Image: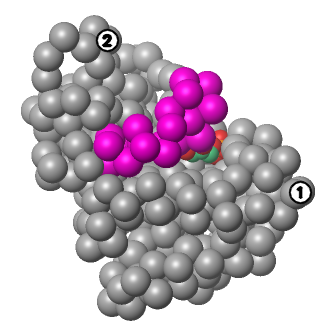
Amino acid sequence: MRKKLVAGNWKMHGSLAENAALLAALKPALEGIKAVVCVPFPYLAQAQAALAGSSIAWGAQNLSEQSKGAFTGEVSASMLLDFGCQYVIVGHSERRSLYGESDELVASKYVAAQAAGLTPILCVGESLDERESGVTEAVVARQLDAVIKLAGVGSLAKAIVAYEPVWAIGTGKTASPEQAQAVHAFIRSKIAALDADIAKQLVIQYGGSVKAANAAELMAQPDIDGGLIGGASLVADEFVAICRAAAK
Ligand code: 13P
């Protein structure tokens, strides 16, 4: 049985004071429930100090594909490990669309994360245009194939995939449970064609305007194994309710 996992993606939000309040609220409320928060780089040490010994893991939202060297402004996988990260988001649609990350670059970041022992949360998903022109599955397949080509299907045994339709991110327009389930099932069947066991145990999170109010019906879908939560992960009560809905 796959265990559902909810991760928060704080994006570029927070401050020492705001984070302290949020983490202090999450810690007791999520006792015994495994969850993840992906915080901005400068706050990794704060997350590590606040969450050590709790059931909440922490991670980053990006990393370099390089291991070290003259790469001004970049952060390596081993630096994330120094701060106790277990997870790192790779290929978020904002990285792909705003910062020009190609499928190939995303795949090399995924490899760098795994080589260091981090669990990549690999984001895939189509834009509104792509959905409307009927190429959702082709886009998701292309994004997955880049990673499978570089790292092999076996690498998915130590990864999480997050399906995040771009049109549902931060828009308040959630994919319906049926729309999300259909793409999740597609992802699983695509992987199953290469390796049935890996497909069966792969955690596939849904992300895009998940909130407490719609979490239960999304989490009830057979191929939705948790969520990657943006806006609602900044509100303690919302994030806790989503994590609890997934843990049911
Ligand atoms: P929202 O939950 O704010 O739509 O963001 C989703 C997301 O991009 C998580 O990575």
- Give the numbered dot on residue 73: 2
Which SS class for mark 2? loop
Residue 159 vs 217, above or below: the answer is above
- What residue is at 28 percent from the left and 9 percent from the top? 72
Q: Nearer the viewer, residue 190 or 27?
A: 190
Q: Is residue 163 left or right of residue 24?
A: right
Tell me which corner region of the image, top left, top right, bottom left or bottom right, holds residue 198.
bottom left
- What residue is at 68 percent from the left and 77 percent from the top? 181
- What residue is at 38 percent from the left and 90 percent from the top? 196
Residue type (three-letter) at the residue carrying disc 2: Gly
Which quadrant of the render holds ligand 1? Answer: top right
Q: Position of residue 156 (x, y in %)?
A: 33, 68
Q: Position of residue 52 (x, y in %)?
A: 16, 44
Over which residues does the magenta segment extend?
88-110
Colour convention:
one colour
Q: Is residue 11 left or right of residue 111?
A: right
Tell me which corner region of the image, top left, top right, bottom left or bottom right, holds residue 106.
top left
Which SS class for mark 1? helix
- Can residue 103 be seen from the camera position used here? yes
- Give the numbered dot on residue 242: none
Q: Confirm whether the magenta stretch covers residue 130.
A: no
Q: Position of residue 126 (x, y in %)?
A: 70, 53
Q: What is the chief secondary structure element of the magenta stretch?
A: helix
- Give the numbered dot on residue 132: 1
- Can residue 88 be seen from the camera position used here? no
**Mark in front: 1 vs 2:** 1
Residue type (three-letter) at the residue carrying disc 1: Glu
Q: Position of residue 239 (x, y in %)?
A: 54, 51
Q: Confirm whether the magenta stretch covers residue 97.
A: yes
Residue 16 vs 76, above or below: the answer is above
Cβ of disc 2 within 8 Å of ligand 1? no
Q: Nearer the viewer, residue 224 or 243?
A: 224
